[in-house]
Image: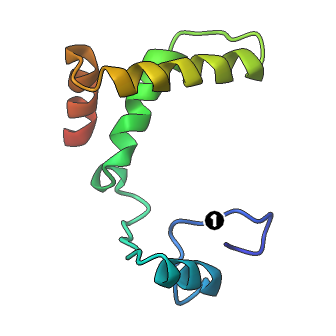
Amino acid sequence: MTKHRGFLSPHLTTKKCQRVATWAAANNVEMAYTPTNSSWLNRIEAQFTALRYFTLDGTDHADHKEQGSMIRRYIIWRNRHADDRRLRAVVDRANVA
C-alpha cells in the first residue's frame, strides 16, 4: 500500500511498494500491471461498466446508504444471472471498447 491515506495504487510496481510485493509473494500472486490509460485491458473494468449501467445511470439516490443497497442488490443479482443476455451485451460492449 502507498503511504498516503493507506490506499493501494494498482499502478505501482512491487519494486516501489514492498508491502504489496511481500503480500503477493506470500499468497502466490503475480501482479499483472496494465497501463493507466488503457482500462480496456483490465477485464474487471467491464464488470464495473455493467454495475454503473444497471445501478447508477439515470438514478438519484437519496443517500449513500440507498446507493450502497442498490449496488449490493445488483451484485447478488449479477452472481445469479451471469448469463443474462442484457448483462452479457453490456459487458461485451465494454470489453471491445
- Residue 31 as seen in the image, left or right of residue 71: left
Viewer can see residue 13: no
Q: Position of residue 72 (x, y in %)?
A: 57, 24
Q: Position of residue 42 (x, y in %)?
A: 33, 54
Q: Position of residue 53 (x, y in %)?
A: 42, 20
Name which quarter of the figure residue 93 lies in. top left
Q: Secondary structure at mark 1?
A: loop
Q: In the rendered view, would you say 27 is above or below 60?
A: below
Residue depicted at 35% across the width and 22% down the height: 80
Residue depicted at 48% across the width and 26% down the height: 75
Classify the position of the N terminus by image quarter: bottom right
Camera-nearest residue between 57 and 72: 72
Q: In the rendered view, would you say 20 is above or below 5?
A: below
Name which quarter of the figure residue 86 lies in. top left
- Residue 57 as seen in the image, left or right of residue 81: right
Name which quarter of the figure residue 87 lies in. top left
Which colouring convention does the figure follow?
rainbow
Looking at the rendered structure, the kind of residue marked 1 is Leu
Classify the position of the C terminus by image quarter: top left
Viewer can see residue 58: yes
- Residue 9 as seen in the image, left or right of residue 11: right
Q: In the rendered view, would you say 10 is above or below 71?
A: below
Q: In the rendered view, would you say 78 is above or below 44?
A: above
Residue depicted at 36% across the width and 66% down the height: 34
Residue depicted at 58% across the width and 87% down the height: 16
- Total residue callouts: 1
Q: Which residue is mark 1?
A: 8
Q: Position of residue 24 (x, y in %)?
A: 49, 78
Mark 1 residue crowding within 10 angstroms, few (<14) / some (14–19) / many (20+): some
